[in-house]
Image (spheres, grey):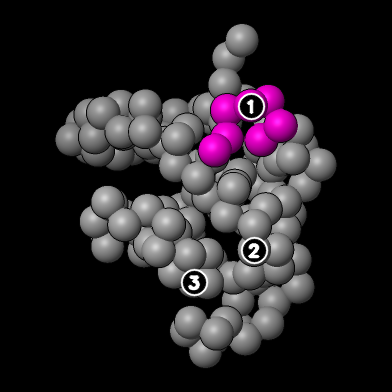
Amino acid sequence: MPDTLELPFDMHRRTDPRTSRVAAKRHEPKLSERRRQVLELVRDNPDSTSGEIARAFAERHKHLSIRVAATTPQKRLPELEKLGCVIRRRPRECTDTGEMCATWRISDGGRRELAKGRAT
């Protein structure tokens, strides 16, 4: 069964340089895992902003670089939204940045995805 956290489109734009396309292909295997990790955090921290989720991501996945931890949620959340796994909700002041930011909540589809037994 294919992993439903795989995107049905390329991770690069048609106009991207070759180096970007090569990098996108190289990172594809990890992206489904990163989406699942972010989805678990959204489930565990409902109505959090991407900044708050990034902080939780860094705390839970200390073995990853700070750059990966800081940028993963903001990149993966819109993808998870397109896949129907999370819902973008009302903005509020982020406790991490002080800015008004969208909040996120897991959808029924996201819960089904995690219930498949692949999540930790």
Front position in the image: 74 or 52: 52
- Packing grade of label 3 (10 A; few <14, some 14-19, many >=20) is many
Secondary element at image label 2: loop
Indicate which disc, 3 or 1, sits on the residue closer to the N terminus: 3
Question: Bounds of the magenta span?
Answer: 114-120
Q: Mark 3: which amino acid?
A: Gly
Q: Which residue is mark 2?
A: 45
Query: CA gap, disc 1 to disc 2?
Result: 20 Å
Q: Which residue is mark 1?
A: 117
Front position in the image: 115 or 73: 115
What x and y, as percent, mark residue 17?
Answer: 22, 37
Indicate which disc, 3 or 2, sits on the residue closer to the N terminus: 2
Q: Is residue 49 left or right of residue 19?
A: right
Q: Mark 2: which amino acid?
A: Asn
Q: Which residue is mark 3?
A: 51
What x and y, as percent, mark residue 14?
Answer: 38, 32
- Mark 1 touching mark 2, by CB under 8 A? no
Q: Mark yes or no: residue 14 visible.
A: no
- Residue furthest to the top in view is 1
Q: Mark yes or no: residue 73 visible.
A: yes
**Residue depth check, mark 3 versus mark 1: number of the one nearer the observer:** 1
Majority secondary structure in the magenta region: loop
What x and y, as percent, mark residue 110?
Answer: 71, 40
What x and y, as percent, mark residue 107?
Answer: 77, 47
Secondary element at image label 3: helix
